[in-house]
Amino acid sequence: MAEPAVVVEVVHAGMQGVLRCRVSLPAGSTAMQAVEASGLLQQLPVEARDPLRLGIFSRRVDADQVLRDGDRVEIYRSLALDPMAARRRRAGKP
């Protein structure tokens, strides 16, 4: 009997557009294994790879998070501006 599989989508929304790849993995696979299987790491800029920030459906997860069928693994990029600095700037405070 074949080992059960999970099918997940791996996505990264960068400045140049969205990269996405659907992968099929053995049950019990992790978020990092999905990212590695997708091949998207080689297409990302260096700053998006280290440290790798991952999420599933907009919820931050660790790289060893076990996946369920239909999950969307998201590779997050660094923030362009610190949220606290942006609030201070909007409020007109130094």
Image (tube, rainbow, N blue to C red):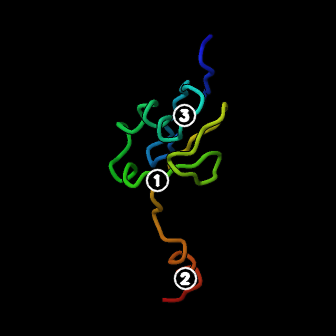
* Distance from Cα at disc 2 to Cα at disc 1: 23 Å
Of badges 2 and 1, the one in the foreground is 1
* Viewer-closest of 18 and 64: 64
Residue assigned mark 1:
77
* Viewer-closest of 62 and 70: 62
Residue assigned mark 3:
29
Q: Residue furthest left?
A: 46
Q: Residues within 10 Å of mark 3 (few under 14, many from 20)?
A: some
Q: Amino acid at mark 2?
A: Arg
Q: Secondary structure at mark 1?
A: loop
* Viewer-closest of 67 and 40: 67
Residue assigned mark 2:
88
Q: Secondary structure at mark 3?
A: loop
Q: Is residue 63 left or right of residue 27?
A: left
Q: Residue at x 46, y 31 (%)?
A: 38
Residue 6: percent from left, percent from top: 62, 27
Q: Residue at x 43, y 35 (%)?
A: 36
Of badges 3 and 1, the one in the foreground is 3
* Distance from Cα at disc 3 to Cα at disc 1: 23 Å
Residue 13: percent from left, percent from top: 51, 45
Q: Secondary structure at mark 2?
A: helix
Of badges 2 and 3, the one in the foreground is 3
Q: Residues within 10 Å of mark 2 (few under 14, many from 20)?
A: few
